[in-house]
Amino acid sequence: MSPKPQQKSTPSAGGKNAPVAPKPTTPVVRALRGFRDQLPTEQQYWNHLRATADALATGYGFSWVDTPVLEETGLFSRAAGRQSDIVTKEMYTFTDVDGDTVALRPEFTPGVVRMYLEHGMGSIPQPVKMAYFGPLFRRERPQHGRHRQFYQFGVEVIGSAAPVVDAQLVALAYRFCEQAGLPPVSIQINSLGCAPCRAAFRTELVNYYKPKPRYLCGDCKKRLVKNPLRMLDCKHADCQPYIAGAPQILDWIDDACKKHFMAVVEYLDGMEIPYVLNPYLVRGLDYYTRTVFEIWPTADAVGATAALGGGGRYDDLVALLGGPVTAAAGFAIGLDRIVGMMKENAIVPPQSAAPRIFVAQIGEAAKIKALQLYERLRQEGFAVCENFSKDSLKSQLEFANRMHAHYAIIIGQKEVLDGTVLLRDMDAGVQEIIGMDKISGDLRRKLENGAAKAVAIADITPTPSNSPEKISSKPAKSRIEDSDKDPEHTDLDNETLLEGL
Ligand code: HAM
């Protein structure tokens, strides 16, 4: 039998023998390491990134898709390459009760290609342009900007080998960071050539590194045998001098791949998208061919430690996953890193421009009227808010103030009998009596004429006028405090209404 929690009686401020609450015996369950909650206070960032992604994906002609979170492990291991970090160390893979080996998706690209093949998308007009936004899972060592569940916004263009596609993808990734409100980012770009170019380069690279293994880091010793290209991407200090002297893949790609790459950078120049050629950029997934790119914060941005996104062309992947030879390209952006950058650089996403109308009530009969009015206004498209679980008007108006409500509609006993409401302008601190049946029209007129700009609750799309701002953190001043000039109000007496505010 488990021991009963004991109630100790020890001296306390409440009196010598006052009972002390027993200590809880059940440990609090915590989120797993590397997994995080998205709190209400963070939703503004995620809503803003979703709205930005929505506007750009639509603007560039993409359709939204999603893929299952769980897929056959083989889908991801065939795509990323058996020697990739994702496959060797990071995949959440297990055998389910039917004996199938399945994995939580570590990236979207293979799932999107599987979807393209499984649903016969090869027979619709090409290219097929798909966008996604959702969670992924990699069992990496958690650290700043690296989580075990993280989110990506990404796009794939399947069915075109044209270099203009690569350039437009880079432009879209750049514009996403710009419109999210980030400080300027740097696009690094390279070409890995096609499979035969890479095979020749691989031999050259191995010949270059062969006499040096004892000076290399532990990982690069293994990479020399299993995945030599990744040696160019090593961040270990011991390996840097060798990377600087290593052969460069751009010298080894064939004429067709060179022509493709030249066209990509010409289009980028034409669109005035800034980029930096990085001959050592190889990416961590094996499926890339020709163009690869990564998006990095510039060194002067706060928290600039890791790539914000990456992508490239993968002309062999569709065939590798069982389809016909089909050229394709895409990229993905790590949204957790974007949110992190926004916070660290004090970039606040735009708030909804919709003015909030708070509905307050005093007494049971008024509560029913208030509930009805709340439903009505909400259905009519007003951005309404409430705190019906509170009975005190003071608490309700304090809440209205915290919600930055522009107007409070107050219903008391007398208003119920008279069929009226008290409409309080929270900014000006004045209030007036309005017939219950006139309230929608009056509110709409006031909102159209007054400082408030938008009425509809749904209107949260960022526009140039409500794009993200870098703010100074000025504390919000209580608008209730200086709002007790109330010349017109007679029905609810002022003392009751503003008591203690
Ligand atoms: P990736 O480079 O593996 O590419 O991931 C893209 C971005 O996801 C990274 O640049 C980073 O911002 C974010 N990311 C990756 N791992 C983590 C993590 N553990 N925690 C937080 N953020 C992370 C891909 O996933 C490719 N599928 C991109 C692509 C699409 N290539 C072609 N199409």
Image (cartoon, helix red, strand yellow):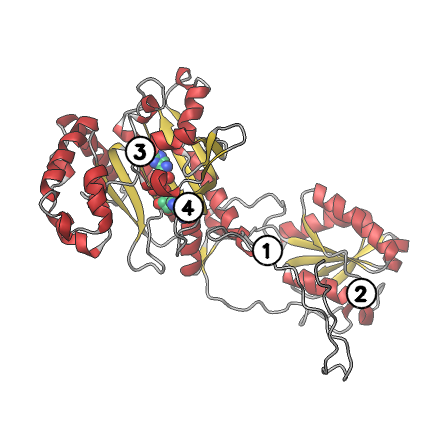
The answer, for residue 444, to whether it is visible in the render is: yes
Depth check, front residue: 178 or 5: 5
Residue 126: x and y in percent read 37, 20
**Residue at 67 percent of width and 47 percent of height:** 382
Disc 1 designates what residue? Answer: 29
Q: Quadrant of ligand 1?
A: top left
Labels 2 & 3 near each other (Cβ < 8 A): no
Of the two numbered discs 1 and 2 on the same chain, state the one appearing first in sequence.
1
Of the two numbered discs 2 and 3 on the same chain, state the one appearing first in sequence.
3
Can you tell which mark lies on residue 139?
4
Image position of 98 with respect to 485: above or below: above
SS at badge 2? loop
Can you tell which mark lies on residue 489?
2
Can you tell which mark lies on residue 292?
none
**Residue at 18 percent of width and 29 percent of height:** 257
> How far apart are labels 3 and 1 at the CA level?
37 Å
> How far apart are labels 2 and 4 at the CA level?
62 Å
Label 3 crowding class (10 Å Cα cut-off): few <14, some 14-19, many 20+? some
SS at badge 3? loop
Residue 323: x and y in percent read 36, 19
> How far apart are labels 4 and 3 at the CA level?
17 Å
Labels 4 & 3 near each other (Cβ < 8 A): no
